[in-house]
Image: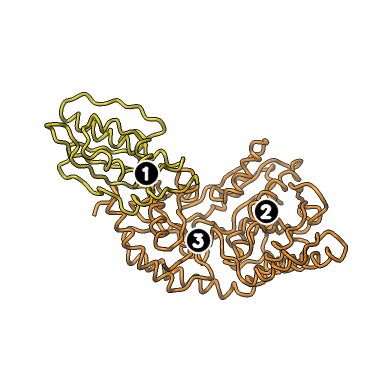
Chain colours: A yellow, B orange
Amino acid sequence: MDGQYSEKVMEHFRNPRNVGEIADADGIGNVGNPVCGDIMRLYIKVDPANEVITDAKFKTFGCGAAIATSSMVTELVKGKTIQEALKVSNHAVAEALGGLPKVKMHCSILAEQALTGAINDYLKKHGKPIIDKKFKDGHEPR
Amino acid sequence: MRKVYLDNNATTRMREEVFDAMLPFCKDVYGNASSIHQFGRPARVAVDKARQLVAGLLGASSPEEIIFTSGGTESDNFAIKGVAHALAGKGNHIITSAIEHSAVLNASRALEKDGYKVTYLPVDGYGFINLDDLKSAITDKTVLISIMYANNEVGTIEPIREIGAIAKERGIYFHTDAVQAVGKAVFAVKGLPVDLVSMSAHKIYGPKGVGAIYIKKGTRIDAIMHGGHHEMNKRAGTENVPGLIGLGKAAELSGKEAPEEIVRLRKMRDYLCKGIASKIAHTRINGDPDRTLPNTANIGFKYLEGESIMLNLDMEGIAVSTGSACTSGTLEPSHVLTAMGIDAADAQGSIRFSLGRDNTKEDMDYVLEILPPIIQRLRDMSPLYEK
């Protein structure tokens, strides 16, 4: 039913994976604003030898979907190279959660933006060109 | 698992006595109340009695001042559009407030599309309108003032007597949406300068889909529902007999029990508020602590978003609602809290606890046991929270 959360969303909301901060993160992505009701901060640890994301953590202010998408995106990108991680779309996050209510799809966009932000932060620090992704109905990175 | 329903401003559980009163009218007494044969007559008698009971609860001087409707939304629409249409020759201006229920706000917006002018009065940090603002908003074209008796989200009770006096002095009709106030605030139209009052059955332990509007004798109003001669030509449509009987019974019981119940609810609500304030840091009460509904507590939890709190409480059997309209499909914070000048982040983290007759002090203790660890866990997850 539209407007209701899937089992998987509720499961990730109840037991979110990878909550917290990474003190020596290689990249941090910050997106959202309180007017819309969600703020996501995503931390990644990257192995410079092979550019594999070895760890990902998040802190999120937001609704059930915001917390569940944060949790899922960190799960999806751990172990992936940053190139692979950049291919993780908001739809992939939503799909992995068994779908999201229509009005909550922006949370999955937020998750993709936070991830892109964290990767760009890493790339910038390493003097590499950043990725210019266009987002529909999302939020401007902060 | 213990179940604690603290969303009584959204709706209430129908009382057994109400259900029992309605049942014969769902089955045996099925005649149309407008039919004068033996099947219709008992329905008519029962509807008339229900009208008397509602008139009694509202303190109307005659049952003819009570018109049955399908609920609070229809009553609000009827008051606003009905008066505006009837007085179209006199003027086209309506005054209401920024914190009204969407039934009043959207009925007013609908009139704006038809060329009417509407003033939405601002409110202060507690949710009160300013009487000087009201006075200066009145023009020669003003035909109606519609200000809610008590706000559904924060509970603030508006200065109805003063507003009514201003309206009366200027010869302007005054409508008040009393859907939340009936049964929770000492309420009687007798001696109160109001011309129209909306109420709903399901907020006072009656059935859903039925309500009433008090229309003071002599008030000019056009029907918005056209058809037969029902409800003294003011509201067409075959009477919802079982519903009206339920409303009548709920009104009767409310009138008898409200004075004591109000005291009990206030005590319990204050106990909950004090408990939350002492057990959880960084909270605030939204609304006025004194001039407020006895059953309503709207509390802001800093650094958090309301839905995540609401869902966590739901998992523990506690039903509340968010101050934010997030769940209803929009992402903006509550229009009420925003109008009160509460910043967006704080508005997002607001929860409404609305108590009712089924609640006990043990329910409050359960909330006070369950809530603090939920808040802490969510704050530990929030990027806005610094220990």
Question: What separation in Å lies between label 1 and label 3 (alpha carbons)?
Answer: 29 Å
Q: Residue at x 27, y 49 (%)?
A: A17
SS category of the residue bearing label 1: loop
Q: Which chain does the numbered disc 3 sit on?
A: B
Residue B153 located left or right of residue B383? right
SS category of the residue bearing label 3: loop
Classify mark 1: residues with Cα within 10 Å, few (<14), some (14-19) or many (20+): many
Q: Which mark is residue B7?
A: 3
Residue B257 located left or right of residue A56? right
Query: Nearer the observer, disc 3 or disc 2?
Result: 3
The residue to which callout 1 is attached is A97
Q: State the residue in front, B330 or B173.
A: B330
The residue to which callout 2 is attached is B75
* Residue B147 location (% of width, % of height): 60, 53
Quadrant, the C terminus of chain A: top left
Residues marked 1 and 3 touching at CB (< 8 Å): no
Question: What separation in Å lies between label 1 and label 2 (alpha carbons)?
Answer: 43 Å
SS category of the residue bearing label 2: helix
Residue B149 located left or right of residue B318? right
Q: Is disc 3 in the same subunit as disc 2? A: yes
Residues marked 3 and 2 touching at CB (< 8 Å): no
Q: Residue at x 19, y 29 (%)?
A: A123
Q: Tag 2 or tag 3, which sits nearer the N-term? A: 3
